[in-house]
């Protein structure tokens, strides 16, 4: 294929130091180095190639995933990679696999819920992958509501065992990744029953498969739950179904850090604070927000590069057509997505520090910020994943027809990403949790309890309920404090409105249920404020590199003002801004898009993604899109022969009017 | 599988005659009968089964599609089906195939652009499928901008032939359905060059493959463009790539209704008005709007039924959990989708009558309504397909985790539907066309030219620019004229704002480009008004059946008020309503959702979709979801053996710490 750089002219117009921006994006020089090394390691290893992934039938696809996972483990050991490096390597392999659950859920569950003794027994086995584990929580009939799970674990004092059982069809474990075909063990969540009493949901370590020949153990029915959205995508994962027929496990396989059952069958709670479990949740959600920024930036990188290559209309006197990235309608859709990728990156970075803070406080038995941190991570998980899912699809649309080809990489990215909107808390359920927390915060304002963390602005309620936005010109919207105040006023006013309406209902619960749609909107307003605030704070820090800060400032303004425009109704109904100020937002956005335009390609280069990781012929670094599309097409199995299989049976008889004779 | 009707209790609460509603949805008793017969015919024929479609690798998948297409053609002939019946049958087979292009594009192109003589030669061959044709317009580097196509058709007076040629890689034909593997012929669009002059894009009939052995003819390179979004979905179609190396065709294979080339090579335009071509466009777009209502109603049917089955949270004292359809957040997302499906159905029905009207006028050489009809269909195509694409994905999310399984039917429905946002005009490009028409209409208002058709309301500009909405209570929002006026005021004010801002720019074109994001929003406002208006008009007609009209009234109000809420910013910025009136919208919506609640399952039953057509275990008529999900899972190829292929090579060595020895 021709060696050209079709995007060189775009890179020449950049007004900032892209290498410095790469460090900002990665978080530090060290993180950039590790990422860069691991990305190249993966890209250069033929085992990790993925260009034919969307063409494989399920069994073949799954087998290649097993191969990649084994090869990765081999390389991790051979190269003595650190935990950080190994995790980055798995990330750049870019293929969901049972190892994600083993390292990401099984090991942490034992660490978080197992006693010292249990950890000593199980963790070394898991660390060496002598056992492979998954996390079996959700059931066929039960998702978000963990308390509704039906699987039982009944203690039998005669044998000192728990009997794990699936009493109904809907109690079948359903969805756990790695369960279907690979895991030898699982942390199984079940209702603990002892002395005739149901003590609710607890975790148990259960062996599922023989370590000799991998066959399911007696009493265990286990399999894959079947094909999922897209080709390739999450079909590399063996999400599983699991049923227990009175499976007996030793009593000490109840994870006992928080509660135990004695030899006699007495249920005993330990004195370890249950709040510790929340820190795991904060951790997991923080990683989900980080993933959102990666997925969105990846899609935006593809759409941006291709928009700079693709030309359409605008040809004057037979000259070349205009690159679509020059159209305002394209900028208006694409640039906010680039800005959002940066916004999510920075709020994710901040969440990481929040997690450290929460962990330290918990160790000091300080639970004062936990509820706020919990609501905040729930809300940000919801906000960033929903936006990213929609954003990936928007990027696909921004690529026109070719975005629909698997070779664009976007269909698979969408299909593999969207479960993030559901797992670890359905996004609407999470927003309702945030709303409950906001209602509580509002109600406590009168008691003099000071709101903390991301709700601290609510302490300023008197001002925010009656302040008037002072923006007079489009340029006034460049002022971060004007933006910040408008978002704070909108959020607090929506929350207060909801609180007032809820209080009019016969009961608080009824009010909450009836107004839940409004409450969700109030929660979104609050969460958007957090992201805007963290972006503004980031830009106010010292930032190295020529022109870097200026670009981030533009992105920050685009992020905030685009939200303001999209949710204009909220801002106007609450009187947080006036219609005229709303119109000035559009004007300022147009100007910001023009400022960003010369830098967009370089801004997506700063994500430092390899062509392997992007996995998109449209997103190629060199912009040499059309030869690549053409080449890729011929690799389709349908092109193995000029005349397709089935011609003789199903095409020729049609053409030759011989269909009546044919037996189909 | 157990025979139960888990949704019987939902059907008992309906307050209207579902059989009468089925007729309203179908359009007439006759159409309901035809649909019903064809749907059952397809559902009962094992060749048309589709439950394993998402599990097949491309070649196998494609072969089954060829089989279905041949079988359908056989049945159509055996049963002497009418054109209406045959088309319905193809619809219910629910699988994109080359026949769609043959009947939907190739035949109409010859009818529309061929002379009488050409029609007599080619149509009988096409009608009997002795030749199979496709429509080769778009190229690798050229989509929406037809004038930018590069393929050339140069007349050679020496041999009386056109030489069809692909001068560049980007001129390769790319995307045409049916081209890759099946079509023997194509209507190819190319630049007509004669006597050294380029006369722009014209259509030519070109044979691609031998009618003897199906091999590509000399000079022709043809193949499939590769895998597309999703599994199953559009991968049943052989979208193709096609290159010409100086392929010669007889002069009389230029489609010559509008222009001819003489034996000497002189280019001559006929006196047939070019506007006739527009009526095809109106026709095609009308069918796309009808498809949108079908796709959205199908998704909404699945999501509604499953929402009535699925239970989560809300359990008091250990009783069953609450059906998720009872949650306001679910209603708030789902019910507007049901309402939109009905809205699109009725606007589609109206578009059909518009097409008849346009055709009759054209035959009488009356072109006065053509521009308006063209803009209107462009806008409605854009509006309904974009909304439907998002709506299907929203329905998937409303089904929680299980919506992500292929067996839910929603992933494939999404993947197969979304091209509608791009083909026959990219949705944003179309909205810009609408906006141009609106700007023209606004500018002509002062000249006294009366706006026609769907822009007639603009004639009332003086009133609409300064009228004030009189809504005082939530119930005032039930008044159709209040709704209508608010939508008209918003649309006209947004258009006028845009026109004023465009006129401030140095040139109109520059103004148009700079403000294109605002113009798109104005176009959307106009198109939403059309849909609202047509729904209101529909409800004002005589409608048979107990309670049917009442339900449609509720749906109409939900459709309009939900839009009003979603686009509140527009209504407030333009002063079309006040913030207080905006708040009353939310209040009224809550009340409307409660009214609709007892009827929703029956309202989606009225679509009269068979379980075969729905293709969803979640959307089953009997609501017996969980056993079906469980059964379907075991059909996955991965479950053919308990121990997966690859265990010995890639799992066992990991577990047994033998990876260093392994060669992967």
Image (cartoon, coloured by chain):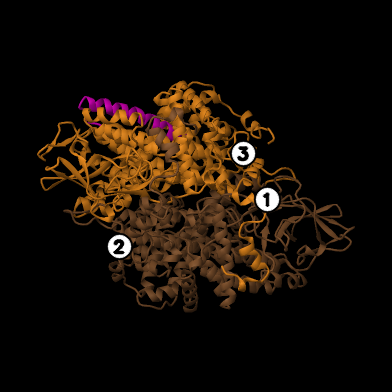
Chain colours: A brown, B orange
Q: Residue at x 29, y 29 (%)?
A: B123
Name the residue tied to disc 3: B308
Q: Nearer the viewer, mark 2 or mark 1?
A: 1
Q: Which residues are magenta?
A: B342-369
Q: Taking B543 as reference, is A18 above or below it?
A: below
Q: Residue at x 41, y 30 (%)?
A: A658
Left or right of B268, for residue B594: right
Say few, some or many: other residues with alpha carbon within 10 Å of mark 2 (under 14 / 14 to 19 / 20 or more): few
Q: Is residue B485 visible?
A: no
Expressed as whole percent of the image width and height from the top left, the position of residue B383 reads 38, 42
Q: Is residue A256 visible?
A: yes
What element does badge 1 sit on?
A: loop
Q: Are marks 3 and 2 on the same chain?
A: no
Q: Main secondary structure of the magenta part?
A: helix
Marks 3 and 2, how far apart in space? 49 Å
Name the residue tied to disc 1: A139
Q: Taking A526 as reference, is B27 above or below it?
A: above
Name the residue tied to disc 2: A594
Residue B274 among those drawn in magenta: no
Mark 2 near mark 1, Cβ–Cβ under 8 Å? no
Residue B169 falls in which quadrant of the image? bottom left
Q: How many marks?
A: 3
Expressed as whole percent of the image width and height from the top left, the position of residue B293 reads 44, 36
Marks 2 and 1, how far apart in space? 51 Å
Expressed as whole percent of the image width and height from the top left, the position of residue A320 reads 22, 57
Expressed as whole percent of the image width and height from the top left, the position of residue B36 reads 51, 26
Using the image as rendered, state which of residue A453 and residue B249 is in the foreground.
Answer: B249
């Amino acid at each position: 294929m021709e060696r050209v750089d079709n995007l060189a002219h775009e890179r020449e117009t950049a007004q900032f130091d892209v290498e410095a921006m790469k460090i900002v994006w990665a978080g530090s020089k060290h993180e950039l180095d590790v990422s860069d090394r691991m990305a190249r390691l993966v890209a250069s290893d033929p085992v990790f190639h993925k260009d034919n992934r969307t063409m494989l039938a399920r069994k073949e696809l799954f087998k290649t995933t097993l191969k990649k996972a084994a090869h990765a483990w081999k390389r991790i050991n051979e190269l003595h990679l650190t935990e950080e490096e190994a995790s980055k390597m798995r990330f750049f392999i870019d293929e969901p696999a049972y190892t994600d659950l083993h390292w990401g859920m099984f090991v942490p569950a034992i660490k978080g819920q197992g006693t010292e003794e249990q950890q000593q027994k199980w963790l070394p086995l898991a660390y060496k992958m002598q056992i492979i584990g998954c996390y079996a929580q959700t059931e066929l009939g039960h998702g978000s509501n963990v308390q509704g799970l039906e699987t039982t674990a009944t203690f039998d004092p005669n044998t000192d065992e728990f009997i794990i059982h699936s009493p109904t069809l809907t109690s079948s474990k359903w969805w756990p990744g790695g369960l279907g075909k690979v895991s030898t063990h699982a942390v199984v969540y079940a209702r603990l029953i002892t002395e005739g009493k149901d003590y609710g949901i607890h975790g148990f370590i259960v062996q599922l498969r023989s370590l000799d020949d991998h066959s399911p153990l007696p009493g265990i029915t286990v399999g894959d739950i079947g094909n999922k959205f897209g080709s390739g995508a999450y079909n590399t994962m063996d999400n599983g179904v699991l049923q227990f027929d009175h499976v007996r496990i030793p009593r000490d396989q109840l994870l006992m850090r928080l509660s135990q059952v004695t030899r006699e069958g007495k249920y005993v709670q330990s004195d370890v604070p249950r709040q510790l479990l929340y820190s795991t949740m904060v951790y997991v959600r923080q990683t989900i927000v980080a993933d959102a920024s990666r997925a969105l930036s990846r899609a935006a990188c593809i759409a941006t590069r291709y928009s700079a290559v693709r030309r359409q209309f605008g040809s004057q006197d037979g000259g070349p057509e205009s690159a679509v990235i020059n159209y305002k309608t394209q900028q208006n859709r694409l640039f906010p997505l680039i800005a959002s990728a940066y916004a999510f990156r920075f709020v994710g970075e901040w969440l990481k520090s929040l997690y450290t803070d929460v962990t330290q406080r918990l160790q000091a038995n300080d639970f004062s910020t936990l509820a706020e941190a919990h609501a905040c991570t729930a809300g940000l998980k919801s906000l960033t994943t929903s936006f990213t899912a929609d954003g990936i699809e928007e990027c696909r649309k921004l690529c026109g027809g070719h975005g629909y080809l698997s070779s664009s990489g976007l269909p698979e990215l969408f299909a593999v990403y969207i479960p993030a909107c559901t797992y670890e808390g359905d996004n609407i359920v999470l927003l309702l949790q945030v709303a409950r927390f906001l209602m509580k915060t509002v109600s406590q304002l009168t008691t003099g309890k000071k709101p903390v963390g991301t709700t601290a602005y609510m302490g300023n309620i008197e001002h925010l309920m009656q302040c008037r936005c002072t923006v007079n010109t489009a340029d006034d919207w460049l002022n971060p404090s004007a933006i910040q105040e408008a978002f704070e006023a909108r959020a607090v006013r929506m929350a207060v409105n909801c609180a007032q309406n809820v209080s009019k209902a016969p009961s608080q619960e009824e009010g909450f249920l009836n107004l839940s749609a409004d409450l969700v909107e109030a929660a979104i307003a609050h969460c958007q404020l957090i992201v805007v605030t963290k972006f503004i704070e980031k830009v106010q820090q010292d930032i190295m590199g020529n022109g870097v800060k200026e670009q981030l400032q533009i992105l920050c303004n685009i992020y905030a003002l685009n939200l303001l425009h999209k949710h204009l109704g909220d801002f106007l109904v609450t009187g947080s801004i006036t219609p005229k100020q709303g119109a000035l937002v559009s004007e300022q956005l147009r100007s910001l898009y023009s400022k960003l335009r010369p830098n967009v390609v370089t801004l997506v280069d700063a994500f430092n993604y390899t062509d392997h990781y992007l996995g998109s012929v449209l997103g190629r670094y060199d912009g040499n899109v059309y030869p690549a599309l053409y080449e890729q097409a011929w690799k389709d199995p349908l092109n193995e022969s000029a005349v397709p299989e089935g011609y003789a049976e199903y095409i020729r008889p049609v053409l030759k009017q011989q269909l009546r004779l044919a037996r189909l």
